[in-house]
Image (tube, grey):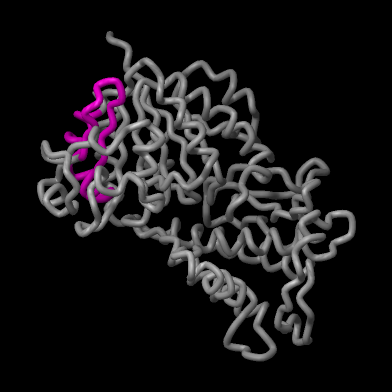
Amino acid sequence: MKEKRKLLIVGGAGASIEFGFPSTFDIHENLKSAAQSNFPLVRDQKQNLYCYIYDEISKYWSGLGRRPDFEDALFAIYELAATYPAGQFTGVIGAFVERHPFPEIIRAGQRKLVDSNVLRHLGAHLVDAILSDFRRRCKTPRVNAAKLQDLMDALASEFEISIVTTNYDDLLYRAAPGLETGFQPDVSDFYAERIFARKSWPCILHLHGSVHFDMRYSDGQLHRIFWQDDLNRNFEQNSWGRNPLNTTEGFAFPTSAIIAGRGKFAPIQAIPFRIYYSELDRLVFQSDCLLVLGNSLTDAHVRIALAGYRDSRRRHVVFVDWASENDMTTCGSIIDESTVRARAARIFGLRPQEISWLGYTHPNTLKRLKDANELERSTAPERHLALWHNGMLEACNHANKILAELV
């Protein structure tokens, strides 16, 4: 029997939105609501500290043509907590940046000045809110989940599959059951050797955490992460009530079962995240082809790992994402840092004239390409790259076209 080739799938938020999971805007709206009950402003109790910080960033960036998302706001909260006087954890940047006056807030019915502790509690409260919302959504039936299952089955018929996902949801985990996670099924504890010393190649790595991660007290350890498959059980995430992850640079990241916000390099050093990230390089090296499902490539550690595909093996790479029909083709937007297709082309070293759509290489909108349910393709034989812009559901409906680009 012919040995199957190895396919690495890298998942991101774009792979889940069409299946009922929140976009970055939806998460932002959820955080606005979550902050309202515990961090309202004294001067306007219909506003809260998270919204104030987000709005200040928006005004500051408006002249640059940039717009923040919830991860930018979270990282600002972490940075601010490090900048404010915080004992031994005060960051060095505080010596150079003038303190920004914050409006007073209401905590436990009392007026309170914003200090480093308030900012840390805000960050932890928001991370807990993200995880709670994802768990709630994962408990409801997944619309069109059967379509994703069909795509995964088609891929599994041709390849051994390993998955690395930055999503918190369990969409890919449910669509590809039985993959190694590193957690011992009978005790739910994590063992690094289950990843590093495994005999079969397939695995699934939740690089930024999962709704199934449960951080509970065990054997004298308060911050150990376990696997809990039943989402109806009680979880003990509670970042709010745990000591933060302090760094020598002055940051105090929430101790959580997920990693949210910019600046993920420090939180990713915890277990099992560090093991997963270490294994990512080996998966990139060992795989025969790569399928990126809705990953925006905004995380530097993911981009750095995927850059390893630019080698002499001429391995096939396919990106599945969604873009508006009015957006420009990759050859016309390759210098646009805000698009996934431009970042993908840059990672794999392609020039504008090396990416064609329906046989053309001049810039145009994506409408004709999307109407034809076709992919953009590189014309450089040593750097095979194909890009699908019609989203996940249409990719599932045209699994044969995705598969044809990988084999």
x, y percent for residue 195: 57, 25
Magenta region includes residue 383: yes
In the picture, the quarter occupied by the N terminus is top left
Location of residue 406 (image quadrant): top left
Location of residue 367 (image quadrant): bottom left
Pick the front one: 115 or 144? 115
Question: Relative to residue 11, is residue 20 depicted above or below?
Answer: below
Residue 402 showing in the rendered view: no
Residue at (69%, 40%) from the top-left corner? 270
x, y percent for residue 8: 40, 29
x, y percent for residue 76: 64, 62
Residue at (76%, 75%) from the top-left corner? 114
Question: Relative to residue 130, is residue 398 depicted above or below?
Answer: above
x, y percent for residue 189: 65, 36
Question: Relative to residue 160, is residue 14 depicted above or below?
Answer: below
Residue at (51%, 36%) from the top-left corner? 205
Magenta region includes residue 211: no
Read off the magenta span. Answer: 376-405
Pick the front one: 189 or 320? 320
Location of residue 156 (image quadrant): top left
Residue 69 showing in the rendered view: yes
In the picture, the quarter occupied by the C terminus is top left
Q: Residue furthest bottom?
A: 43
Q: Residue furthest top?
A: 1
Residue at (32%, 19%) from the top-left corner? 314
